[in-house]
Amino acid sequence: MIVNDLPIRRRTSQTPPPDNQGGRTRLLIMGFGMLVAFVVLTARLYDLQITYQRGFELQARRNSLVERKIPAPRGLIYDRNGEVLVRNAPAFQVAIIPARQYQSDNLIERRVKRMEIYHRLAQMIDQPGVTAGDIYTKVYAKIQQARPYDRVVIADNVPREKALIIQEQALTMPGVVVQSVGSRTYPYKELLGNILGYIGRIPAGQETTYEQNGYDRDDRVGLAGIEFVAEEQLRGVKGREVVLVDASGEELRREGEPVPPREGYGVRLTLDMRLQKIISDALIPAMQLRNAPRAAVVALNPKTGEVLGMVTVPGYDNNLFVQGISQKQWQALQEDLHNPLLNHATDDLVPPGSTFKIVTVAALLEEGAVTPYTMINDPGTFTLPDQYDPENPDKGQKFYCWIALSGNGQHGPQNISDALRNSCDTYFYKAVGGYAPEGIVGMGPDKLAKWMGIFGIGEPSGLEIGFGRGFAPTPAWKRNTFGDVWTTGDSYNMSIGQGYVLATPLEMARVVAAIANDGVLMQAQIVREIVDAEGNTLRPFEPKVTHKLPISEATLRLIQQSLIDVVSDRGTARMSQIPGFQYAGKTGTAEFCDDVAIKTGVCYTGIKYLPTHAWFVAYAPATDPRLALAVYVWNGGQGSGVAAPIAQRIIAGYFNIPLENPAPIQKSELE
Amino acid sequence: MPDRRLWRHFDYWILFAVIVLLLGGVAMVYSASRGDPVIERTPVDQAVTALAGLIVLLLISLIDYTLLKNVSWLLYLGTLIALGAVLVVGAERFGARRWFEFGGFDVQPGELAKLSLGIFLAHFIADRQGRRPYLETVILSALLLLPCLGLILLQPNLSTAVTLVFMWLAIVYVGGLEREHAVIIVLAALAMLFIVFQLGLIEQYQITRIEQLLGINVEPGETYQADQALIALGSGGWTGAGFAQGQQSQLRFLPVRHTDFIFSVIGEELGFVGAVLFIAFLAFVIYRTLRAAWIARDTFGRLLCVSIAAVLFLQTYINLGMQVGIMPVTGVVLPFVSYGRSSLITALAAIGLVESVAMRYKKLEF
């Protein structure tokens, strides 16, 4: 290291490097080391860029190419004649793109200006949960996620007018955008609310289930009614497109060809909107007249089981659910004792009253309990002797035929068709429950219960919406439920569709439809066909037979004739005849005193006459029937005075028969 | 104007290489900052700084570097004071105090220290050459360097500290280190490392970065920067996506792409060919710096050039190494190429010194 040719003293740093040779060697070594290092680096670079290029390219693509789904327009719902029952209408959302907001280097000014905009927005939107603070929280949460170009939806379901105003003013509110999402409007509102149902966000807790079926978290899905049951057909298939995005999530352009979405299939219902309106026009004024809070009408094609009309009151405006129902509106629906959310045509379980006698007649004749010629006397009022003390008249239970209560005395001796035509309670009491003093042994409740099932009461109806099922009581049921013995009185009540008997309006419509259809009970259906966007039928309509009733031709004819007689000068519905047009029907006036009746004050302890549902089942025309009908008016009074006139108007309307003097609707029982 | 003969030895090659790198750098900074409003102005800034830096380069090359010996202690003390002051009055960014802000113009004393301490150490060692036992010189120089390192680690700025240690090693090595000294030096370096860790001068994030490089204790998303850089570089292929066409760069997936990660932009857009060209030019500049050391007329000049070569090499290597995934992620820029006013001026000033040394080498011309 030290070169000794110079005296140390004279050595300064200005002298040439003392160890020229050694220093240069070291320089060479150092330079060589650096070269090796660079070669290693280059080799590594070669590995990255050439050997593994493909893998990195894929990762780069995955970074910037994002697959987006293109929403599919939801299929429409039509009536049987192709009338559109629901429209696809955009719902408006107000969103903020954080990156496009007011910018300024002055952070305080920026904050103040942005808050000013949030305040303005909140005022314009005017929805609960959309305050300037709420907007701030949502927007800044997004900024935290470093996706400043992702839209932050700050308000859903903004009314169109407001959305347009906000859109106009968006120029002065940087970052604010109005966007639309697929939604629905239901032009018929309450008239079809319970049938069509509604769509909405995926219910909380079911996200995973829906996602497994290919839904995205923000999708709108059918939640009730046809929208729910036909979801699979209506939803369609989403399209796909690939978009180039940058690191902040801003979309730059579309890459390649998008896969277009497939529009949802159309659902054609069996409903006939013309009939639906006729029913509504007949029903609503009658209800108003009677001050009746609840009613339902079911109209079937008796030959096919198709639901041609179904009106349930009170209903709900299904638009509310799509547009975002307010807490207040939701509470009102929940608290209404007459439950607007319930389809009363399919789910109201109520005593069917005398309309039920159709079932009783069929059972009595087919079980051989009576013959068409068996005569039973109706004295109007009679006493059923006490089971254990038959000699003591004081212990006996008094029974009345309705005719005695209405002050017209008695029916006298009746055969079974008289009894059905006149709705003679006493005949059915004695024939089903037995009457010892006259030596009549009753058929008993078990057989009648069996026949209820045969007529489809308490059985699945086949209808896609609504799942209410009536109830056929039996002595065994009563013992198991109340620990009590079935009495003859129970049988009496059951025989006339009272007591423990429950049925839905749809079930009673099917009972009368089965009679109209010569004993073939059809499954009720409301979805007629599935059609694609081009109008091709993908699934044609197929009537489905539940079963053929085990009922003789003679019994069938007897019942049919009796029902025709009901709507004749001799029958209970004589007021509701249609001149020149023959149809069949059966009135019913069903006493009730259920929870709702007590809560609404319709029924109370010590009331003299129980309140009644007005019922009428019918089919028309009498020969080759094309319409079967059940009319039920909750607390509507008399079947003959209220329900039958409603049915008369519906039938006349449906068959285009001008009614010069429609049957008056009985305003009250005091008339 | 100094002697015209001076220009005869002016190293035009190194100037040429530097200018090529500057032009390439400005172009890539432009590509990296395109369409991003936050860094839109950086290419213009970079070009202006480069021009100013070239003037500085020429001015410095005119000054006889031997004059620096008179101010070497002053430079040392000034550096120490600046490094101390930045801890007190410096601007804090990303959790580190490294910057003085002078009305929009940032100065990193750590950046200047690489040059000033290089001058000081070169002089300190050259001056004692032959007068004092070399081992004593080495130890003394290490002791003088230590307070600077301590202050830099307090910022904290591990990469600058490592660069300075590397520079010191290079100087003392070329300055005449014997084999037996080397053992002592290595032991001393290990001891220093031990002390540094014991004193807690290493921050957790620095350990984490090294762990990330080794692939231990890595949490998802933590290595985002390094991953994106690898994706950008790796997708380049032979010739790249084309200038201003790289998806990773243009779509901003690549972070700090105009500064620390500019090489990833180069790799993605210009491919292996372009990347290797940049490396070659950088290596060439270092080679010419070592050549100046080779021909330097005195020890001071030689060691000065060695210090500059060492710093240029290590900065380049750390920067490129972090992008190809063989070095931990640190805030080291690529000399002459990355955007950064302070670092660019310093680098060009250093080349000015190299020129000054090269121009004044004596081939016994009288």
Image (spheres, rainbow, N blue to C red):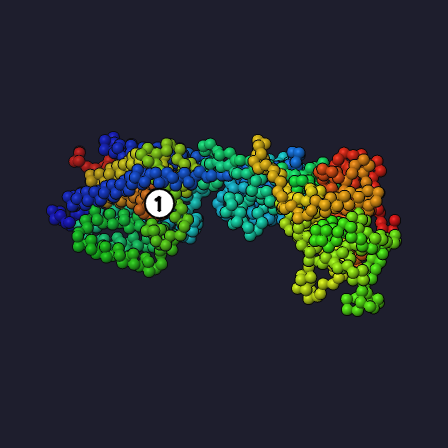
What residue is disc 1 on? B332
- Give the vertical position of A11 relative to A170 (above or below): below
Q: Which of A79 and B149 lies nearest the eye of the viewer? A: A79
The residue depicted at 30 percent of the width and 54 percent of the height is B146
Residue A221 placement (x, y as % from top left): 58, 44
Residue A630 at x, y percent in the picture = 73, 45
Q: Position of residue B139 (x, y in %)?
A: 24, 55
Q: Who is closer to the viewer here, A77 or B80? A: A77
> In this rendering, would B298 be left or right of B344?
left
Amino acid type of the residue that numbered disc 1 sits on in the rendered structure: Val
Task: Give the residue at the far left of this rendering.
Answer: A5
Is residue A249 in sight in this rendering? yes
Name the subunit of mark 1: B
Residues packed near mark 1 inside 10 Å, few (<14), some (14 to 19) or many (20 plus): many
Residue at point 16%, 45% (across, down): A22
Q: Is residue A405 left or right of residue B150?
A: right
Camera-nearest residue between B181 and B278: B278
Question: Residue at 76% across / 49% down in the picture?
Answer: A372
Give the SS element for disc 1.
loop
Q: Position of residue A216 (x, y in %)?
A: 52, 44
Which residue shows up at 36% across the image and 58% down it?
B200
Q: Is residue A432 left or right of residue B52?
A: right
Q: Is residue B47 visible?
A: no
Q: Disc count in the image?
A: 1
